[in-house]
Image: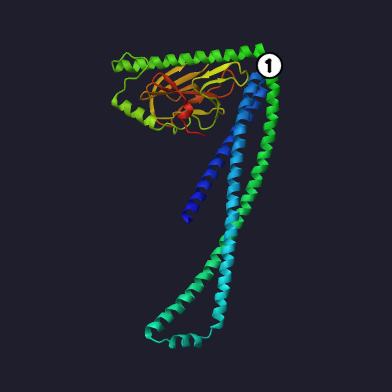
Amino acid sequence: MLLFLVGMQLNAQDRRESLEQKRKALQQEIKRINLLQESNTAKKQNVLEEAESLVQKIRTTQELVRTYNQEVNLLTDKINTNQHQIESLRAELQRLKEDYAKMIGRAYHSRSRQSRLLFLFSSESFLQAYKRLKYIKQYTQYRERQGEEIKAQTLEVQRLTRELTAQKKDQEKLLAENKVLQDRLQRDKRLQDQLLAEINKKGSQYLRQIQQKQDEMAKIDAEINRLIREAIAAENKKQQSSSTTDFKLSPEAKALAASFEANKGRLPWPLKSGNITMPFGEHPSPLAHNVTIQSNGIRIETGENEPAYAVFKGKVLKIQAIRGANKTVLIQHGNYITVYRNLTDLYVKSGDTVQTGEKLGIVGHSRDTDRPTLNFYVFKDANYLNPSQWILRR
């Protein structure tokens, strides 16, 4: 039972630390979004860009509120556990003290050395005298152990009481911070409603802009798909294969692909900091629900002059400048390809062998939002995969 309780406490502590790290990361994201909003306000961004920033901020704030609630609930459970443990220890301590008091009383009544000698000499045999001597020693040792146990229990109660006081302070702090955060969230939602109302008021005008962005994104993705097929065809030509959709792999390439696949869900992020502003797949536009957005990768916004990093070892398959998207780097990992779009000031060239975490280039500004933005894709042969399922969750 003791090992089980200790295990539960360690697990709860690990979860608390994980939630705390997540909370701090989300707070940094919101701070960065606020800085971007201030920067873009100075640049007189249009309503669509402002609304997109606000959508991301609200989404991140909601996740932060959930994290706060999880932390508070975890702390509340720990407080309740400690309170029960303190009550149990105090009851046990009271019992120990009462038993010890009775023991001391009996020892007082038989405290004379002469009484103990008479107790020994009145034995009917040497064996009985030996057993009585053992009993006297054991009784003395037991009394000492009782005293030590009372001392240890007292110290444990004091420790848990101090811990409980600190936990209650942490809980009060988290609740106060969460209250401020929820007030800000409501304020941002009201602002979002105002912006959406303005967008709806000039529906056709903004709808054309939203659709135009979607069309441009589709053209860029089509260009990337063409590059992938060309790269596959070029590599397969070396292996005497004419396929443009599936790699013909050497034994070494098969081993690399297997290693890449084994790390699914554990690959590092292509950026040290940033947040996903557009997920993978098909979903309605947050600004116009009758417009569907098809995203074949993920869009990650980051800070100024942030470098992008290779998520796994491999070979730089191709580097291509794409109109409206700066430079795109394709890295081959067997029959898997990771694509890093919108880079400037590259550190690599075609044919280079790169290692996990190696710098590839600096993230450029998006033409739409004027914010540093990396578009990240994962392919298996010529097929799109969801990058969020491959990189570590934050």
Determine which residue is flagged by label 1.
Answer: 200
Which element carries disc 1, helix, strand or loop? helix
Q: Is residue 90 left or right of residue 121?
A: right
For disc 1, the neighbor class at 10 Å (few under 14, some 14 to 19, many from 20) is some
Q: Looking at the image, which is closer to me, 289 or 349?
A: 289
x, y percent for residue 186: 69, 31
x, y percent for residue 327: 48, 19
Q: Quadrant of residue 93?
A: bottom right
x, y percent for residue 306: 53, 29
Indicate whether 79 appears above or below 323: below
Residue 154 appears in the figure: no
Write the residue at 45% across / 32% down. Answer: 265
Indicate whether 123 appears above or below 174: below
x, y percent for residue 109: 56, 82
Indicate whether 193 appears above or below 78: above
Q: Indicate the amino acid at tag 1.
A: Asn
Q: Is residue 82 left or right of residue 4?
A: right
